[in-house]
Amino acid sequence: MSKSIFQRRGLLTFIIFIFTLIYYTPFLGSYGLFDPWETHYGEVARTMLQRDDYISTYWQDEGFYSKPVLLFWMQSAGMALAGLNKTGVDHPAEMAESTRPEWALRLPVAILSSLAVASVFFLVFTFFSFFAAFLSSVFLAITPHYALVSRQSITDMPFLALMTIAMVLFILGLSENRNISKLKIFSTKIRGNLQINITSVFIINTLLVIAVFPQYMLMAANVDASTVFIGKRIQLSGFLVFIPYLLLALETAVSNIRGKTTLSSQFIQGGFVFAGLAILAKGFGALVIPAATFFIYFLVSKKWEKIKDFDILKGILIIIAVSFPWHHAMMIRHGNAFFQEYIVHHHFKRAALGVHGERGIFTYYLTQMAFGLFVLLPILPAAISWHYRKIAEKKPDESFGKSDFSLILIIWASVTFLLFSTMLTKFHHYILPVTVPLAVLSGIFISEFKPETEKIKLSVFSGLILAILTLREFFLDSAHFINLFIYKYERLFPYEYKLSTMLAITGFGVIFSTVVYFVFRKKWAALIFALSGAVFTGNLIYSYIPTLAPHWSQKQLHQIYFQCRQDSSERFIAWQLNWRGENFYSKNQVLPHMDLNSKDFLAYLRRYSIKEKGTSPSGRFLLLEIHRLNRLKNLMDKEFYKKNPEVYSGKTSKELVSIIGPDCKTVPDESEKHFRMKNFSVLKAPYPHNKFILVRIMI
């Protein structure tokens, strides 16, 4: 790879990054955070800011050990830059009164997602044409599942983006000439003979420093440890405890400076750095897909000699240096509680025994892939078939090239599908990582396919049939796309919005443009196909999701509460629910009363209820599910209003319990069965949320 080619690819890669980010950014903060994951993780990050503790992760006042720390660092940095939580809990309304929290939490994820798309462009450009690289990156950016999760502040996209960049660097390392020691990327003279050179060695060493040194300083300055020596407990400084991780990174950096590595090994070192960061995003499972993919590649291709390029021992040491400091600090601080929940429960039991989520059979994810990959679906069977033929045509003694790249992509997709299909715990978004290799396979196929000599009629026909059947499904049920990343798929969906019409129109555009491409088979036709996919996914992320968001977010209900309460004594109470948004949007000032017997809830109300006639009752705001309203009214009548009629001047829940809507207006409490999902009740009057209501009770 020459300097000029590298610089040209670098500039184009940066342009791809910018345009991808521009595509993902519109309306990113215009709708509230989705329950329960965005608000759950957001509250953990907000607590970091409040405690000024960026090591231990807390939910309320208890340790939160189900996820590693990277997303929380990203979120807390975003909130700090947005000027949020500067006064702790003194201003509880700030999370609900503006769009800053949503921008602060989601933008870092969108940036990381865009970087992964750009890295795919750079990789494909190494083996194929600019057009192949362009289509591959565009196809990934507009793949519905990838785009939807790129705009969600959850752990899955940081995990996938970092793992994708790691895979990109690993593949580049395998393809590079092992005789080149380094690459001069940028050079300039600033005064006389003084010259600044930026080389590949400088970049990989800088990456190592950024990934390890801040962690070392954070852990060393805030975590002390002790040990027992000859019966005496000895306190150790954190600077001593965590120095091995810094030394591991420094050893690699010094080795690079001394010229003991090649350009190939520098790419692979970078891959190990990003693999370590991916572990900090979602756990040690980040190693499984790359390790299995390359092991199977070496097994199938019989190129075992290339495994030496990986220098696995050094790679393991880099991963330890990058990903272990935080885990080590958590073990020191929280010990077995952290180990049991984080490692045993959320790593092993989630895979082998099932934790939360659904179960499903081996084919569980095929349905989710049909919706998540819809814009690629018409060409995907043809693309896979074409790549298989190219792999079969490769001669065994050929050097690493296009066919090897195709083989790695197919193995990557297959390993991902098999891994998540065999796990007992299943959520729709778990299959997200399959989008990357399949999008790249599709982009290369559209660019490289030669219609005059290659025939793929059957696979093209099957792709079109799959796309038509999938379009029919989401026309009949438009909930499929939001189900790609939410929790509780059986939740009430607002079918009255008739979102299926626009989905069907834009979906038909994708299918029609596929036909146009295979009829004309020109670059302009391929661009029309890409544009139709961008329009389809644009409709999802700019219209479909913002329209549905109020029913999956508590933001608007909290806005109503802060607007309508008289003062802070009118507390916000979450009654018999636990959806996490009540914590984030109140800055954890919510009073949770989840017990179904309402014992603690009643004790709280009795403490503040009026005791004698002539005293004006005070208000409390309750967030509850619609179907629990009658239970609440009966409870208040039984325990307060009808029990003490002289105190409440004969008034009952009919007058003293009311649903509060926008502008503090009382909303009629008449409800009815939803016209389509008959097991759900909804208010007859318009209301911002179809699951929760905000109720004021007077006590």
Image (cartoon, grey):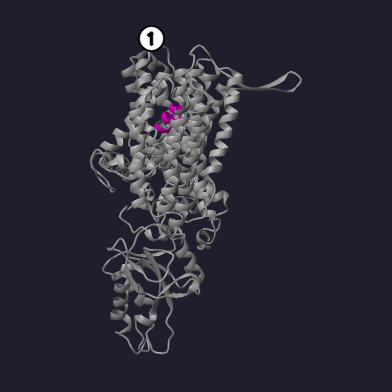
Q: Considering the image in quadrants, where does the N terminus appear?
A: top right
Which residue in the protein does label 1 denote?
Answer: 397
**Residue 642: quadrant of the picture:** bottom left
Between residue 72 and residue 100, name the one nearer to us: 100
- The outermost residue toward the right is 192
Residue 696 appears left or right of 628: right
- The outermost residue toward the top is 397
Identity of the amino acid at label 1? Asp
Between residue 561 and residue 244, name the one nearer to us: 561
Can residue 467 be seen by looking at this rendering?
yes
Magenta segment boundaries in residue numbering: 438-445
User: Relative to 270, does residue 353 appear above or below in the rendering?
Assistant: below
Where does the image place residue 228, in percent across and percent down from the top left?
Answer: 35, 36
Where does the image place residue 46, in percent across and percent down from the top left?
Answer: 48, 53
Where does the image place residue 388, in percent across and percent down from the top left?
Answer: 35, 22
Where does the image place residue 671, in percent across and percent down from the top left?
Answer: 34, 71
* Crowding at mark 1 (Cα within 10 Å: few <14, some 14-19, many 20+): few
**Residue 393: quadrant of the picture:** top left
Which structural element holds mark 1?
loop
| Point 42% across, 53% down: residue | 501
| Point 76% across, 20% down: residue | 192
Between residue 521 and residue 435, name the one nearer to us: 521
Residue 517 appears left or right of 8: left
| Point 29% across, 43% down: residue | 426
